Amino acid sequence: MYKLSKSRVMIIAAICALGIFFAIPNMVSNKEALPSWWQPVNLGLDLQGGSNLLLEVKIDDVIKERMSSIEDSARQILRENRIRYQNLNVGTDSVKVKIDNLNARNKAANLFKGIDSGIEVIEDQDGTLTIKYSDVELNKLKMRVVEQSIEIVRRRIDELGTKEPVIQSQGSDRIVVQLPGLQNPEYVKTLLGKTAKMSFHMVDSRSTAADARRGKLAATSRLVQGTMGETYVVSRKPVVSGENLVDAQPSFQDGQPVVSFKFNSLGGKKFGEATRDNIGERLAIVLDNEVISAPTIQSAIMGGSGVITGNFTVKSANDLALLLRSGALPAPLEVLEERTIGAGLGADSIREGIVASIIGLIAVVVFMVAAYGLFGVFTTITVFMNLFLMLGVLSFMGATLTLPGIAGIILTIGMAVDANVLIFERMREEVKAGRSTRDAADAGFTEAWATIVDSNLTTLVAAFVLFYFGSGPVRGFAVTLAVGIATSMFTSVTVTRLIITWWLNKYKPTKLPI
């Protein structure tokens, strides 16, 4: 202990310098001028204000849509195999069809199972077949829909440039969206409320809307309203769906805002073939079950890209391009709860947190100086260094600081001196046992190390458990607690040891000041 190698001293000094360097942005008033890699700790919703949205994923709509698709497939199977049937209809979670002939019914049941994985076909006593998803497959479908919805919501929020949003599931069908710093969430709600499900359908030129309303509608066609109030008869099966879309950008054509789009190779091939084989026909662009444009195909479009025209403004073209780029929501979202936290309330929380931290810091410093004299002063230096290192690590990680996170910092201030207390008490015992000043100091650090590691390791395990099983504020507390434990172990042992070694070598005391 008497002499520390230069390399070790340089490593300790470098770590402390880096901690201070990354903590500096937290004390700068003009944070906007700082580079992106040198930023302060992000403040959570409860500290800087913002908006909290609770969204419900309308999973029933997805299941109903899936059932409608299964109905179309079942009808096609029955017609292709010339199976006579009655009362083919779709419900909220099943499709039913009555087939009187036993052999035809068994054949149809086997064919229906191949429509989609996880489908089960149940036969009733009256000859009715019920097609539905199994309970296991239904639960898997619900989980996939929620996960996909979270990912799409995250993409849309990220496109808006919102800093450090919190997006996570709650329960089986809900999503919590926290947007720090955003006081007016109406625009975000509008964007999240749109499923942005786009597809391209051929307009059925053989039927008119008037014929369709009189019941003269082919099974392969359906009625769709246009954005300008007109009604279109379009094919049920899309030529190309939005799943094949890889990019969408706002642009201008003849001085008017439009949205240019690009397909992947499969979508480009389908789109090219459809436009080549249907020159002179109209192609309807359907967005969220509304026809936004239905141009006439003038020539084959083989490049895998095109342009959506309509009555766009610059803003609406930008919004549509953003929605198409981020992808379609698998299910509609409904806002169940909306809370806005004012910036003033967050400022009060920060001020109270700072006051509590200062009180805790003063109490710790007074106790350590009163109990251990000069070594208590050395401990005070390490406590301040610990705070700098904590802020530096949290800033470097890009962590978000919440009110429970401040509680974690305050707790860490008190825990930061635990290791020093163990070390100093061990030194006292060694002095009482008759050892010299230097030997007692060396033994204090060496013998107390195992106890320090054990006590901090158990707390660190608890922090990891909180982080793994917790969410939101609980995770914020766990992160600051874990970082605080790591930095306090470094400062309490390494930095304190460096200071005491320097003091022993310089003044060569005959008595320890504790």
Image (cartoon, rainbow, N blue to C red):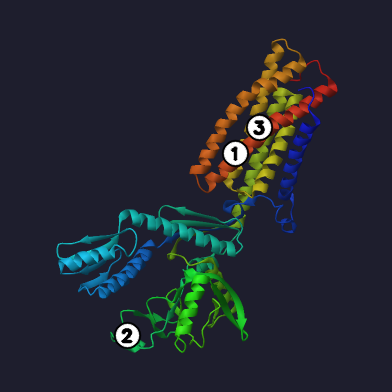
Q: Position of residue 404 (x, y in %)?
A: 57, 44
Q: Position of residue 144 (x, y in %)?
A: 42, 57
* Residue at figure coordinates x 63%, y 38% from the top left: 484
Query: Which label's residue is closer to the chain start, 3 or 1?
Result: 1
* Residue at figure coordinates x 29%, y 87% from the top left: 214
> Is 356 above or below relative to 243?
above
The type of residue carrying mark 2 is Ala
Q: Residue furthest right?
A: 506
Side of 106 where 64 appears, left or right:
right
Q: Is label 1 in a helix, a strand or a loop?
A: helix
> Is 18 above or below relative to 29?
above
Q: Is label 3 in a helix, a strand or a loop?
A: helix
The type of residue carrying mark 1 is Ala
Q: Is residue 377 something that shows in the picture?
A: no
**112 vs 433, nearest the viewer:** 112
For residue 218, what is the image quadrant?
A: bottom left
* Residue at figure coordinates x 67%, y 15% from the top left: 429
Quarter holding the C terminus?
A: top right
Query: Is the C-beta separation of discs 2 and 1 under 8 Å?
Result: no
**187 vs 239, nearest the viewer:** 239
Quarter holding the N terminus?
A: top right
Mark 3 to mark 1 CA distance (whole Å): 11 Å
Mark 2 to mark 1 CA distance (whole Å): 66 Å
Residue under label 2: 212
Mark 3 to mark 2 CA distance (whole Å): 77 Å
* Residue at figure coordinates x 46%, y 54% from the top left: 169
Residue under label 3: 489
Residue under label 1: 482
Side of 44 where 62 appears, left or right:
left
The type of residue carrying mark 3 is Met
Q: Is residue 191 something that shows in the picture?
A: yes
> Is 391 above or below relative to 148?
above
